[in-house]
Image: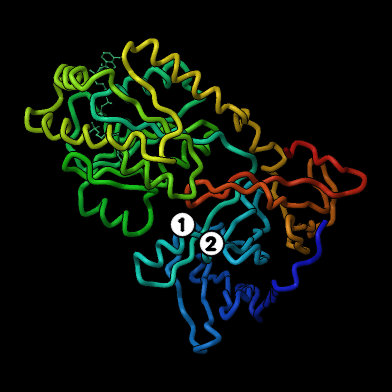
Amino acid sequence: MGEEAPEFRVDPITLGSKDCQQNAIVVGDKTYVIGRTDDDSKSSFGIKILDKLTQTWIVPTVLGAQPPSKSHSAILINEEKILVVEKGVSLNDSIWFLEIDTPFVKQQRKIKGLEVVSWSKGVLGVAQKPVVISGPSGVGKGTLIAKLMKEYPSKFGFSVSHTTRSPRVKEIDGVHYHFAGRSKMEQDISEGEFLEFAHVHGNLYGTSIEAVESVTDEGKRCILDIDVQGARSVRASSLEAIFIFVCPPSFEELEKRLRARGTETEEQIQKRLRNARAELDQSNSPGLFDHLLVNDNLEACYENLKKMLSLDDDHKDSDGCFIEDGKATACYSILSKTESEVFLQSETGEVVKGAASLLAVDLSSLTGGAPGRTRGLKIHSINSIDNDLKGIR
Ligand SMILES: Nc1ncnc2c1ncn2[C@@H]1O[C@H](COP(=O)(O)OP(=O)(O)OP(=O)(O)O)[C@@H](O)[C@H]1O
Ligand SMILES: Nc1nc2c(ncn2[C@@H]2O[C@H](COP(=O)(O)O)[C@@H](O)[C@H]2O)c(=O)[nH]1
């Protein structure tokens, strides 16, 4: 165990009214006040920032779904995140992070020109890395993904993108795409709801954070079918994924497949073929794609895809991350922090089945999900009589 980090100061303030509990966290010249307020029987989290240099209060734009706003305790983890532990909810729902200076928050602050913070829910266990599949239009990405989903329906889940293009015959809203109006989609993008977006073949396409996280929350490995610009954006995001580029055996065969599909006009086919040349040129961009997959014979290509995925199969399915005992109502508050762990103490002091009076939250294993989730949480008991917290991996 390391030393207590001296530079982190936490001043929990409980104001007079039992309806309003606030924590003040000092980060450099700023003090973040995280408070629960009850208005008209509705609870919500209020966040204010005191700038000590200018002695002014700032009310930031708050992104992401917020915690249930019961009673909480909070501590600064590092210059990027504050840990907030909710009481009176299940352990699975009790760990939250207020992102104050993560790359995502920095990016949103720049886009909006405003002070921004973002909530991110802590999720127990490590999920398998999402798989990003890119390649020119007509190469067979959708065909390969459909085969994978059919063979492994409980292992893989598809990230349903948003697009402004019109649905094709047989395409179902919410299944193949979320078909969206341009202005609504642009507004949602500006509000930070998208992991990535791109203008592709004359339309706007994008992956919402929710599209990826809802698949991962189900314990499935998420598959994204996105263009090369989108792949580049995901590479630059906090989402750790593997990136596969699907190539055609020849440009002539690509054109043949695109025409045979019969879903585009001649003008659209020409546009897609022009863009295909540019996409193929980028398939070798350094550090972008982990694997190149040639789709000549479909069955052979599919077998190669399966091999690629099992090569990366270093984590077991995330089934079991949501532990039965983690569903019981918990009442933990933050006790102290070291470099790598935060200790939580049960307020009831009871040691009941699957719970413990002292827990350690391991911070070393946190991985970036899409913004909105912090995955890889490990929690273990540090009770001397129960050193192996039942059920928590
Ligand atoms: N290996 C293959 N050999 C021959 N035809 C194929 C092969 N793979 C896919 N196809 C066919 O090529 C056409 C295009 O495939 P698909 O729609 O899966 O491409 P895509 O890469 O998803 O395209 P888009 O990016 O435009 O959505 C389909 O008609 C599909 O049946
Ligand atoms: N950057 C993104 N690209 C996406 C997304 N969803 C799909 N796509 C790509 O668009 C083209 C065309 O698709 P089509 O369905 O109109 O044929 C294709 O290359 C897809 O991979 C997305 O969310 N973001």
Q: Residues within 10 Å of mark 2 (few under 14, many from 20)?
A: many
| Percent position of residue 260, x then y | 16, 16
Q: Is residue 226 above or below residue 347?
A: above
Quadrant housing residue 38: bottom right
Asked whether disc 2 touches disc 1, contact meaning CB atoms under 8 Å apart, the reply is yes
Q: Which residue of the protein is positioned furthest toward the right in this rendering?
A: 385
The structure residue drawn at horizontal position 21% and vertical position 54%, both measured from the top left corner, is 183
Tell me how many marks there are.
2
Q: Is residue 159 above or below residue 251?
A: below
Classify mark 2: helix, strand or loop: strand
User: Which residue is nearer to you in this view: 168 or 314?
Assistant: 314
Classify mark 1: helix, strand or loop: loop
The structure residue drawn at horizontal position 54% and vertical position 22%, both measured from the top left corner, is 310
| Percent position of residue 95, x then y | 64, 54
Give me the C-alpha separation between circle 2 and circle 1.
10 Å
Side of 119 relative to 14 (left or right): left
Task: Pick the quarter of the image with the N terminus.
Answer: bottom right
| Percent position of residue 96, x then y | 60, 56
Q: What amino acid does circle 2 point to? A: Glu
Task: Pick the quarter of the image with the C terminus.
Answer: top right
Side of 238 relative to 285 (left or right): right
Quadrant housing residue 327: top right
In the rendering, which numbered label is found on residue 99?
2
Q: Quadrant of ligand 2?
A: top left
- Mark 2 vs mark 1: which is more N-terminal? 1
Q: What amino acid does circle 1 point to? A: Gly
The structure residue drawn at horizontal position 34% and vertical position 43%, both measured from the top left corner, is 230
The structure residue drawn at horizontal position 56% and vertical position 52%, both measured from the top left corner, is 121
User: Which residue is nearer to you in this view: 139 or 82?
Assistant: 139
Side of 45 relative to 289 (left or right): right
Q: Which residue is mark 1?
A: 64
